[in-house]
């Protein structure tokens, strides 16, 4: 550390220089991220309330009330009534919380197992590792749909939880949540839906008149949902969300921290200190945008998704891995050649996509920061790369 501090202007200059290698969302090159630039209004609110700490809610009862309000509002958006929950650091923490609950609710199972699709996010692998849970992964069919028969065959007396995904990381597809619900109906198995990405897309697709499979609390067996404001909600990073149907579970499985200045309380969090500013910012953003504002954003992303998909269909050498359900486009080679070289070549031109070797596809997430002009530039380069790699 310096002995004597620098002046603020000099520090700002150094920061600009040191951060210049970072990619910006508006460059257009970030095509494979599920995060985006937070909404301007959310940013301005966040700065004002950056010191609020929801790790000690007794000190910040106003912030806590706003969190309860925003959670209940999102719960309603997901067709639930009196839904509880809280903001997390992201989808990974929310999924970890769900997996811990699944295990805790079944102390009678010595070697707990969770059944989930092979397309589920790797945060479940992390959770399984941390919680000593065995994951049983169900296969997908050729069209990337979950193989339900295989899923069912993996259920047994050690199953404490099942997971369905509403918006897979690789392709944005929605698992058959209702059918998974039927498989566990009447069984003492916790059902978690990971809608980290889809949570702030699917409700608005529905409102735009697009056919959407049932995926939320309208499916009776669904116990909890992950949905991240910092993805399609345009909230501040980090803003994840965990939503739970049954309050008794918090009393049964929650942690307590007796020494807190604001007083003890039951909570499900892995972390202690946690931001209140991100919650307040998202509360404000929801009031500001309303249903119509979010629908508008989703509509624009879907229009750009269709633009990209139509172009990919016309490029020789590559094809869509699946028809997009939401604003995620998977691109694969027509001849089955490995996607790795294509990804590497695109990276040379600075295009940052997501690569999924297990499904042999690269993924574009058509986030709010991705414009038609960015996509046109990308398509030009994609055509060049297909020729260079002789995919044509
Ligand atoms: C479906 C799904 N779940 C969970 C996560 C993890 O979210 P986070 O990176 O916010 O922890 C992701 C990340 O992309 C995801 O796509």
Image (tube, rainbow, N blue to C red):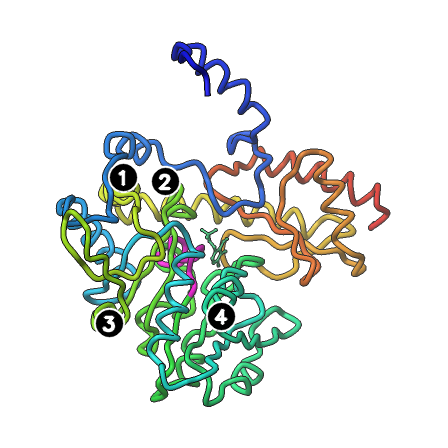
Q: Residue 175 carries which label?
A: 4
Dot 2: what SS? loop
Callout 3 crowding tier (Cα within 10 Å): few <14, some 14–19, many ≥20: some
How much space separates mark 4 and mark 2, taking CA atoms?
28 Å
Task: Find the residue positioned furthest to the front.
Answer: 3
Residue 202 colored in magenta in the image? yes
Dot 3: what SS? loop
Residue depth check, mark 1 versus mark 2: number of the one nearer the observer: 1
Q: Which of marks 1 and 2 is nearer the N terminus?
A: 2
Residue placed under numbered mark 2 in the picture: 236
Dot 1: what SS? helix
How much space separates mark 3 and mark 2, taking CA atoms?
27 Å
Percent from the top left, x then y, of residue 210? 42, 60
Q: Earlier in the sequence, mark 4 or mark 1?
A: 4
Q: In this view, does 91 lie to the left or right of 221?
A: right
How much space separates mark 4 and mark 3, taking CA atoms?
23 Å
Q: Residue 54 carries which label?
A: none
Q: Is residue 106 above or below residue 376?
A: below
How much space separates mark 1 and mark 2, taking CA atoms?
9 Å
Callout 4 crowding tier (Cα within 10 Å): few <14, some 14–19, many ≥20: many
Q: Nearer the viewer, residue 93 or 137?
A: 93
Callout 2 crowding tier (Cα within 10 Å): few <14, some 14–19, many ≥20: many
Q: What residue appears at the point 75 percent right and 47 percent down from the top-left corner?
A: 342
Q: What residue appears at the point 54 percent right and 48 percent down from the top-left corner?
A: 365
Dot 4: what SS? loop
Q: What residue appears at the point 24 percent right and 72 percent down from the top-left corner?
A: 246
Residue depth check, mark 4 versus mark 1: number of the one nearer the observer: 1
Q: Which of 343 and 310 is in front in this view?
A: 343
Residue placed under numbered mark 3 in the picture: 246
Q: Earlier in the sequence, mark 4 or mark 2?
A: 4
Q: Is residue 207 left or right of residue 172?
A: left
């Amino acid at each position: 550390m310096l002995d004597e501090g620098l002046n603020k202007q000099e520090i700002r200059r150094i920061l600009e220089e040191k951060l210049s290698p970072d990619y910006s969302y508006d460059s257009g090159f970030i095509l494979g991220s599920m995060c985006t630039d937070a909404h301007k209004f959310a940013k301005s609110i966040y700065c004002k309330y950056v010191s609020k700490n929801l790790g000690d809610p007794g000190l910040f009862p106003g912030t806590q009330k706003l969190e309860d309000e925003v959670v209940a509002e999102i719960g309603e958006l997901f067709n639930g009534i009196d839904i509880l929950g809280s903001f997390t650091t992201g989808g990974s923490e929310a999924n970890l919380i769900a997996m811990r609950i699944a295990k805790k609710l079944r102390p009678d199972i010595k070697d707990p197992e969770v059944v989930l699709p092979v397309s589920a996010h790797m945060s479940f692998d992390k959770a399984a590792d941390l919680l000593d849970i065995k994951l049983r992964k169900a296969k997908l069919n050729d069209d990337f749909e979950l193989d339900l028969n295989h899923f069912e065959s993996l259920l047994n007396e050690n199953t404490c939880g099942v997971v369905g995904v509403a918006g897979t990381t690789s392709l944005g597809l929605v698992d058959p949540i209702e059918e998974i619900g039927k498989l566990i109906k009447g069984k003492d198995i916790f059902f978690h839906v990971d809608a980290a990405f889809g949570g702030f897309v699917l409700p608005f697709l529905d409102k735009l008149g697009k056919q959407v499979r049932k995926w939320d609390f309208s499916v009776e067996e669904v116990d909890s949902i992950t949905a991240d404001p910092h993805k399609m909600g345009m909230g501040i990073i980090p803003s994840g969300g965990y939503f739970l149907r049954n309050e008794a579970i918090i009393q049964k499985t929650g942690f307590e921290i007796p020494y807190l200045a604001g007083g003890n309380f039951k909570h499900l969090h892995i972390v202690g200190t946690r931001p209140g500013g991100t919650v307040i910012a998202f509360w404000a953003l929801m009031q500001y945008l309303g249903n119509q504002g979010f629908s508008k954003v989703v509509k624009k992303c879907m229009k750009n998704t269709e633009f990209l998909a139509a172009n990919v269909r016309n490029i020789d050498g590559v094809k869509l891995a699946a028809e997009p359900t939401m604003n995620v486009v998977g691109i694969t080679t027509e001849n089955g050649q490995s996607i790795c070289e294509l990804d590497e070549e695109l990276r040379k031109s600075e295009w940052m996509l997501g690569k999924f070797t297990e499904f042999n596809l690269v993924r574009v997430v058509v986030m709010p920061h991705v414009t038609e002009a960015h996509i046109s530039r990308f398509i030009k380069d994609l055509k060049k790369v297909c020729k260079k790699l002789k995919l044509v």
